[in-house]
Image (cartoon, rainbow, N blue to C red):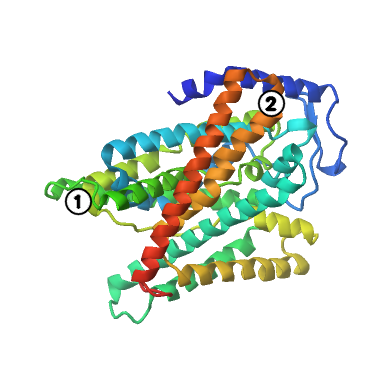
Amino acid sequence: MTLAFINIFEGEDQAAETDCLLREEGKGEPNMVADNRNEETDDKLTSDVPDTAHQISTDSWFQAGFVLTTGINSVFVLGYSGTVMVPLGWIGGVVGLILATMVSLYANMLVAKLHEFGGKRHIRYRDLAAHIYGRGAYSITWTLQYVNLFMINIGYLILGGSALKACYVLFRDDHTMKLPYFIAIAGFVCTLFAIATPHLSSLRLWLGCSTVLSLIYIIVACVLAAKDGINAPPRDYGIHGTSTSRIFTTIGASANLVFAFNTGMLPEIQATVRQPAVKNMLKALYFQFTVGVLPMYAVTFIGYWAYGSSTTTYLLNSIFASPTYEYLDTKFGIRGSALKFKNLSFRIIARGGYLVISTLVSALLPFLGDFESLTGALSTFPLTFILANHMYLVAMKNKMSSIQQFWHWLNVAFFGLMSIAATVAALRLIAVDSKEYHVFADL
């Protein structure tokens, strides 16, 4: 079904292939960094690669697929029963997740196909936007991306602290250790992890551990929820609240839907993929949005079936900030061995400082569901859907039919309106929760 949806605009694929042929004939831009150049005999295509302190073209599509898949099946999956299904119900939740899967795959494919647009390999989202729109778009896209990843980090830290607190109260329910303390502990561990992994390609070993641990907590969650569901009395699956509150929670849930499937850093992940980068990235995306979504579907639907409208959130720990780290490492010339004193001390100061700020904000306002909605509204909608469709429209406009152009403009307009509405809804939720809870609340 999803592949059929993607193939509706087959003419766009042909346009992308035409662009590749133009680059093959040498009509691209001049080389920028010769030692990063990648020449592949598979597609006889050479693309210029910008300067970067991180590794380029080192990973298989399968590894990239696992990076994307672990992103989908991160700790947030244990909360989608409550943040997506409860506000939308069975029909809205199931249909919404399937539609979000399809449109997210389509939007990410658009970005992936632009990776070598103009004969240059765009290893950063902001570089791609600047190449298509001009230099002014660089700062705007970088701001959106930074906000997106910063808020995702905040969510992960809140979840890590919540998980540690849940383990603590199993043994001691004396309220001595508060949630902000556990968030601080989670932030410290994440800082150590950020220092130990200099770039995305160094995640190989961690990906294996992460995949195993992800499967463990997803399987455990599914088994325990199924057991509770079998033994529980009939559940309430109704959507509660006033008409006004239901409108806002529904809009907020739509932001959570797009948040579930997108990281806002696809070009950075694609930069690590070996040539042919576009074909291999498409393989990784197909893996992510087919096999990769099944665990998330399972835990989301089983959790809601077991607990109904009373479903709550409980999650674990991870971290994502690679574009920020790559920017700092490249700007300050952090190259060579990760264990060199200069490189190690820089990562401790730069990444440690970044995560100290993230941890402080997480402890200050630990409203997880609200941050999911705000992240989806402020950055995921613009980065993944609005920019993806409009960039593809601008880049391939001369090769599109009027129907194809109308389709992309329709996407831009629709997701633009959704972004505005979801931002208002998320800010309302944060305002309501801020009145109910004090800062550094022990939730």
Q: Residue at x 80, y 48 (%)?
A: 51
Q: Residue at x 35, y 50 (%)?
A: 249
Is residue 73 visible in the rendered image? The answer is no
Which residue bears the numbered disc 1? 228
Quick check: 434 above or below 208?
A: below
Is residue 117 visible in the rendered image? The answer is yes
Q: Residue furthest front?
A: 244
Residue 420 position in % (x across, y down): 50, 47
Residue 347 position in % (x across, y down): 69, 66
Q: Secondary structure at mark 2?
A: helix
Quick check: 128 above or below 166?
A: above
> In the picture, which quadrant includes the C terminus?
bottom left
Within 10 Å of disc 1 (Cα), the crowding (few <14, some 14-19, many 20+) is some
Separation of marks 2 and 1 at Cα, in angstroms: 52 Å
Q: Nearer the viewer, mark 2 or mark 1?
A: 2
Which residue bears the numbered disc 2? 396
Q: Secondary structure at mark 1?
A: helix
> In the picture, which quadrant includes the N terminus?
top left
Amino acid type for the residue under numbered disc 1: Asp
Residue 91 occupies quadrant = top left
Q: How many marks?
A: 2
Position of residue 111 in the picture relative to residue 81 (left or right): right
Q: Residue at x 63, y 17 (%)?
A: 401
Residue 121 position in % (x across, y down): 75, 37
